[in-house]
Image (spheres, grey):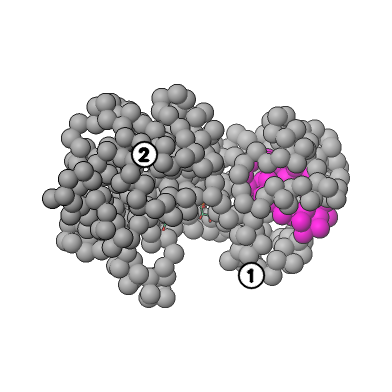
Amino acid sequence: MNITIAGVGYVGLVTGVCLAELGHQVTCIDIEEEKIAMLQAGRSPIYEPGLETLLEQNLGCGRLQFTTDPHCAYKKADIVFIAVGTPERPDGTANLEYIQVAAKTIAQYITNDIIVCTKSTVPVGTNDQIKQIIESIKPPYLQVEVVSNPEFLREGSAILDFFHGDRIVIGTDRPEAAAVLEQIYLPLKTPIIKTDVKSAEMIKYASNAFLATKISFINEIAAICEKVGANIDEVAYGIGKDQRIGHNFLQAGIGYGGSCFPKDTKALVQIAGNVQHPFELLKSVIEVNNRQISLPVVRAKEILGSLKGKKVSLLGLAFKPDTDDVREAASLTIVKELLEEGAIVTAFDPIAIPNAQEVLGNSIEYTTDIRQALVDAEAAIITTEWEQIKHAPLEIYESYMKEPVIIDGRNCYSLKEVEKYPITYISVGRPAVTPKYTKNNSI
Ligand code: UGA
């Protein structure tokens, strides 16, 4: 199969590299020349565990190529996966500009009958639009089928998810097109669900909205736990044991970020609104999430009073561990709020500093050394549950901070462990720990 991937963002790149690994001939096209040059040289523009190794291997054996030339990308293609971005518009709707451009370009350059497969997250009905655009431009003697094939890859474990996913969704009314895609995915042995196009489009939004709902739900329970003196870890474990509920996505914290949940929840509210269905539940999910993100700064002010001129260390810039992605990361909002309060911020992150710097510039200091971030800090706010943070010995807070105050937005430490140190420790949905003695004077 000659496969072309339109758009070498996060989804397109992982899909292209993994399909090449399955033995297909894959060409990836993007308009960003710098990115394509980097990929041709075997370097990945994003950090994703295992990606660069597969990239090098498949470039090396000639199964994978990168180009900015649509003629080269589409001339022999049998299948085209559209994986361009669908960024959020100011009103929350998905911007489909890149999708439309991709559809037009495909129609102009194809020379075979093809299947166009949409991986990008698009509102219900978009695949019909893609079909119309292509039909209106392509040569009349060519056959084009458009299939919805949403992706469920998580950043940080995308390669694993590709090879060991829970399901593959193929949305089409054409059994022949579904059969071709089934053949492509067959070696993965992942269960395949075949639906109509609109249901496939909806499965993607509903999946992300449901996961976001679980997170906001547990964060609401965490807020109540704090007030009644319960512990969210024990509550989440207790409810998760019910197989109908499950343990996943019940980690309380400062909310969800990233390029998907914030964007897709807002888009689904819009999609529902367009058909006169006010999606109140999802609106509340979004509201709860916005509140969670601001919690650390509220807590810091409760403990320290004014933050003006005080050094605060921020532990974690990426929106979650194992990625360098800072899109919609809680860290960015928290830094903004801290700076507005007049705090002096030093941020630690093992790999996301370059991406954070593009947004935050020189407004804060950066370091890849946790200890350095803590020197003379009056509060440490944990925003990402990096292994480097979870495994950091608690002694370092005592050694490097003034009087150690940890505001843990990801519940990284056990309360029992923290109690052994002179640390004021505030986490999410768990009782606060106040030190039995202070760093410099025993109480
Ligand atoms: C999410 C979905 O999990 C993928 O299935 C989907 O393919 C992807 O969006 C997408 O639409 O492209 P991702 O954004 O990479 O993947 O990350 P998640 O692991 O889902 O985490 C999202 C956010 O929720 C993170 O900020 C994470 O810290 C937060 N989270 C997650 C919690 O606060 N609590 C949890 O229990 C789980």
Give the side of residue 274 with respect to residue 311, left or right.
right
Q: Position of residue 373 (x, y in %)?
A: 40, 37
Q: Quadrant of residue 281?
A: bottom left
Q: Residues within 10 Å of mark 2 (few under 14, many from 20)?
A: many
Q: Residues within 10 Å of mark 1 (few under 14, many from 20)?
A: few
- Relative to 434, does residue 312 appear above or below in the rendering? above
Type of the residue with mark 1: Pro
Of the numbered discs 2 and 1, the one sitting upstream in the chain is 1
Q: Position of residue 286 (x, y in %)?
A: 36, 47
**Which residue occupies the extreme left position in the image?**
443
Determine if residue 163 is in view: yes
- Label 2 sits on residue: 374
Between the residue at mark 2 and the residue at mark 1, the CA separation in whole angstroms equals 47 Å
How many dots with numbers?
A: 2
Q: Quadrant of the N terminus?
A: bottom right
Q: Is residue 218 magenta?
A: no
Query: Which region of the structure is painted magenta?
Result: 1-29
Type of the residue with mark 2: Leu
Q: Is residue 28 magenta?
A: yes
Residue at 42%, 60% in the rendered image: 249
- Relative to 46, does residue 354 appear above or below in the rendering? above
- Label 1 sits on residue: 191
Give the side of residue 309 with respect to residue 192, left or right.
left
Between 402 and 103, the one lying in front of the other is 402
Task: Give the label, 2 or 1, closer to the camera.
Answer: 2
